[in-house]
Image: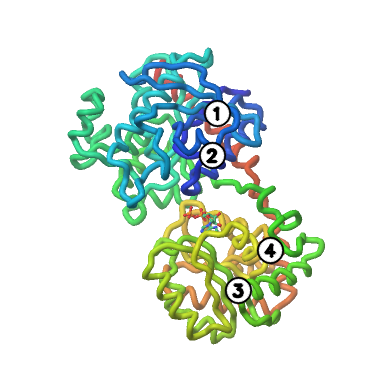
Amino acid sequence: MAKRILYASSEVYPLIKTGGLADVSGSLPRALQSAGHEVRVVMPAYGDVIGKLKQAYPVGRFDAGGTEVELIETMLPGSDVLTWLVGNKEAFGRSGNPYMSGDGNPWPDNAERFHLFDRAVAELAQGRAGPSWKPDLVHCNDWQTGLVPALLSLESNRPATVFTIHNLAYQGLFDYDTFQKLDLPNVFWHHETLEYYGQMSFLKGGIVYADQLTTVSPGYAEEIQTAEFGCGVDGLLANRSESLTGIVNGIDTSEWNPARDQHLVQTYSKLNLERKLVNKTELCKDFGLPVDTGMPLIGMVGRLVSQKGIDLVLDILDRIVAIPAQMVILGSGESKFENRLREKVKNHSDRISIYIGYDEALAHRIEAGADMFLMPSRFEPCGLNQMYSLRYGTIPIVHAVGGLADTVVTATPENIQSGQATGIAFYEPDADELYAAIRHAVALYKNQAIWKQMQLTAMRQDFSWAGSAAEYSKLYYKAMDDAVMEVG
Ligand code: ADP
């Protein structure tokens, strides 16, 4: 049954992106609309977004908790998903990063800005903002939209609410003075509502008040209920475990398709996998490495931060090159890791090459050219690169956490025998374990028959958004039942 869905997010690709949230917010609404729902996306009208839009129309003004906002209507580029931008010059008109000023610190008025956005979303949700459209359900994402379920809990005849956690590490914490400035009802200053050890938590608004909670993989949904991964709210999440579901993100299968990829020198598919080798040769040339097609080539792309386990890789780089194997790394992040990598390259310039920076095309070329792909993340809510790797027949080597454990089937003898293996997992975030996993991968690589079977199985996996959208649809019906029960 088709429903009216209001999808609220602080970043939506391709309008603005700082991370995976934007990818999801740009893809899931389309997939939901293709599944028959009537979807409206709502996000703040950031200065840089307004400047980029060719067609955007002001459709009204309304009061959002005492501040006037403008509603601007556009289409999510390349789609038929109607998108509303909430405009207020003072809050959102500035250009640059949506959350941080140029010096890397959060904007000092972030609480006021996202409080205003959330008030506006709540008005839209109640059908009071102008457009004669009222959703059946509001889907909120991360702390920036956490007040929406809280505000709607005060309303009668409200739509159902779903709150998705993309990254639990960011909680939107502000002091008590800020809470008072926002003029929120006193009921929200309590440890069972928004108060969190003397601070106000936007995230708790979502966790406490949404009808249903989701996160971006079943594995991470379990993990965040434990002290190790729960960032201080594990108890709260465990209390709501009956309403917490993990749904793996999809990937953009037209953007990431080895048979059509514009960034590749040679496209390929399951039917002509031997053509993948041309990409390996080209990748070595791109990175200035000697071409040795018989030697395993390991790729890595991502933020160079400890979450991604780059320190584990650094600890064993000398041993990796001695296997022998070659390695290409694309990324940027903490300077201590960038510098250590530069040092390593000096000693092993025929085996390791790095590119410090962000380069979309090169990321595609690594996925296609490498034989194996490393993701030794300490925690990983979902992860995208391992899914790209699988689709490109590039065998992922992963630390079995969160979405990595959910999407990669490790090469045990049984899984190889039954033709289900797609990668190699290791179980402790430890350099020796990582090294053992790489050795295991290299041993399998030398067995052409097994390796090819793993590649083909990997390439057959379906990570399209349609499957995830179907799971969200099911959850929406559940949330609507919950909302009805609460009101009834
Ligand atoms: P996270 O969101 O934690 O950074 P994900 O694996 O979920 O990790 O998504 C990261 C995305 O950003 C992937 O699409 C990855 O290819 C891309 N990416 C990260 N760093 C770079 C880089 N230096 N150059 C190109 N793409 C990058």
Neighbor class of circle 4 (other Cα within 10 Å; few <14, some 14-19, many 20+) is: many
Query: Which residue corresponds to mark 1?
Result: 83
Q: Which numbered tag is attached to residue 15?
A: 2
Give the number of the mark in front: 4 or 2: 2
Specify which label sits upstream in the sequence, 4 or 1. 1
Measured along the vertical axis of the image, is residue 101 above or below residue 330?
above
Q: Secondary structure at mark 2?
A: loop
Type of amino acid at the residue the image marks with label 3: Phe
Q: Find out if the beta carbon at label 4 lies less than 8 Å from the nearest ligand 1 atom.
A: no
In-front residue for pair 163/114: 114
- Residue 422 shown left or right of residue 195 in the figure: right
Give the number of the mark in front: 2 or 1: 2
Neighbor class of circle 1 (other Cα within 10 Å; few <14, some 14-19, many 20+) is: many
Q: Which numbered tag is attached to residue 241?
A: none
Tag 3 near tag 1, CB within 8 Å? no
- Which residue is at 42% across, 44% downward? 96
Q: Secondary structure at mark 1?
A: strand
Type of amino acid at the residue the image marks with label 2: Leu
Specify which label sits upstream in the sequence, 3 or 1. 1
Type of amino acid at the residue the image marks with label 1: Thr
Give the number of the mark in front: 3 or 4: 3
